[in-house]
């Protein structure tokens, strides 16, 4: 099928997913998966749901709730946000893709750090989005002042990966308040050491926060994320 690819696809450098070795003698770190199992309460809920549908397949034959109503209600209860503020996705990669499609293009571009999640430049190229890469400081900290003086969308992972460094909530607010464009904060690793920007959502309409259950909750296999 390669002969039918568009010129944009032909020029892409594909994202290479981390290898999944079957040999248990290795300690696997390349995809940042949680080494611990999910909460026993999570497994209890999954098993309970499976047993309710066991044998009949009554729910498996049906399409799922496209609004993810139950999940949204749970997010609202935990984080104190309104249901109309949330959209869900199959992992934060899908949520990020939808953000690139919905908010950025060749005119209204986006900037992000040069050392960060490697999918950001892949999506920029895939969707034809103008992008600007901002170099980190020599000590790998984020040059906050460069993100407060730029006139385009901003995408930040906080804490950043792979550096593991985070900026404070005050610094996040400086960036959001000084920018008229959309600011996206990717909080995939926030539970490991940073303040969530969710508390700023009611104050700034140009802020979008992405969360996932893949990392701290050990649920990468379920592909659950929201923004």
Image (spheres, rainbow, N blue to C red):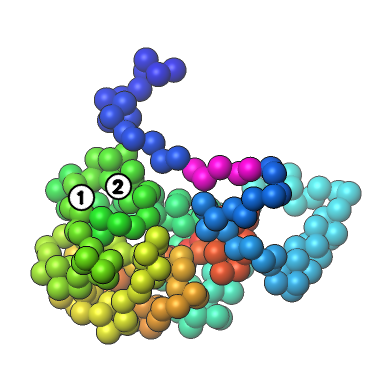
With 17 as the anchor, is 3 left or right in this view?
left
Q: Quadrant of the C terminus?
A: bottom left
Q: Earlier in the sequence, mark 2 or mark 1?
A: 2
Secondary structure, mark 2, is helix
Alpha carbon distance from label 2 to label 1: 8 Å
Q: What stretch of residues is rendered in magenta?
A: 17-21
Secondary structure, mark 1, is strand
Q: Nearer the viewer, residue 16 or 98?
A: 16
Is 18 magenta? The answer is yes
Q: Nearer the viewer, residue 106 or 19?
A: 19
Residue farthest along the front direction in this orientation:
25
Image point (23%, 45%), residue name: 129
Pointer 2 residue? 121
Picture coordinates of residue 136, whole percent (x, y): 23, 63
Image point (40%, 68%), residue name: 164
Residue 210 appears in view: yes
Picture coordinates of residue 224, whole percent (x, y): 56, 59
Q: Does the residue at mark 2 contact the one at mark 1 (Cβ under 8 Å)?
A: yes
Image point (30%, 47%), residue name: 121
What label does residue 203 carry, if any? none
With 200 as the anchor, is 59 left or right in this view?
right
Image point (19%, 59%), residue name: 134
Q: Is residue 105 above or below residue 165?
A: above
What label does residue 131 carry, if any? 1
With 45 as the anchor, is 217 left or right in this view?
left
- Dividing the picture into quadrants, the one containing residue 112 is bottom left
Residue 224 appears in view: no
């Amino acid at each position: 099928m390669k002969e039918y690819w568009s010129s944009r696809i032909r020029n892409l450098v594909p994202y290479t997913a981390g290898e999944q070795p079957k040999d248990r003698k290795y300690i696997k770190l390349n995809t940042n998966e949680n080494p611990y199992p999910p909460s026993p309460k999570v497994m209890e809920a999954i098993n309970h749901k499976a047993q309710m549908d066991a044998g009949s397949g009554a729910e498996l034959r049906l399409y799922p709730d496209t609004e993810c109503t139950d999940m949204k209600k749970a997010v609202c209860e935990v984080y104190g946000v309104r249901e109309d503020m949330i959209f869900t996705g199959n992992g934060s990669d899908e949520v990020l893709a939808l953000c690139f499609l919905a908010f950025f293009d060749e005119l209204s571009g986006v900037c992000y750090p040069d050392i960060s999640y490697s999918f950001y430049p892949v999506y920029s190229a895939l969707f034809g989005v103008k992008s600007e890469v901002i170099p980190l400081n020599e000590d790998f900290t984020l040059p906050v002042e460069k993100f407060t003086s730029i006139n385009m969308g901003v995408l930040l992972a906080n804490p950043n990966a792979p550096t593991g460094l985070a900026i404070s909530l005050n610094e996040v607010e400086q960036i959001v308040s000084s920018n008229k464009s959309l600011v996206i904060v990717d909080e995939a690793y926030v539970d490991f050491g940073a303040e969530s920007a969710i508390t700023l959502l009611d104050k700034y309409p140009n802020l979008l926060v992405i969360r996932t259950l893949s990392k701290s909750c050990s649920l990468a296999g379920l592909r659950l994320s929201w923004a």
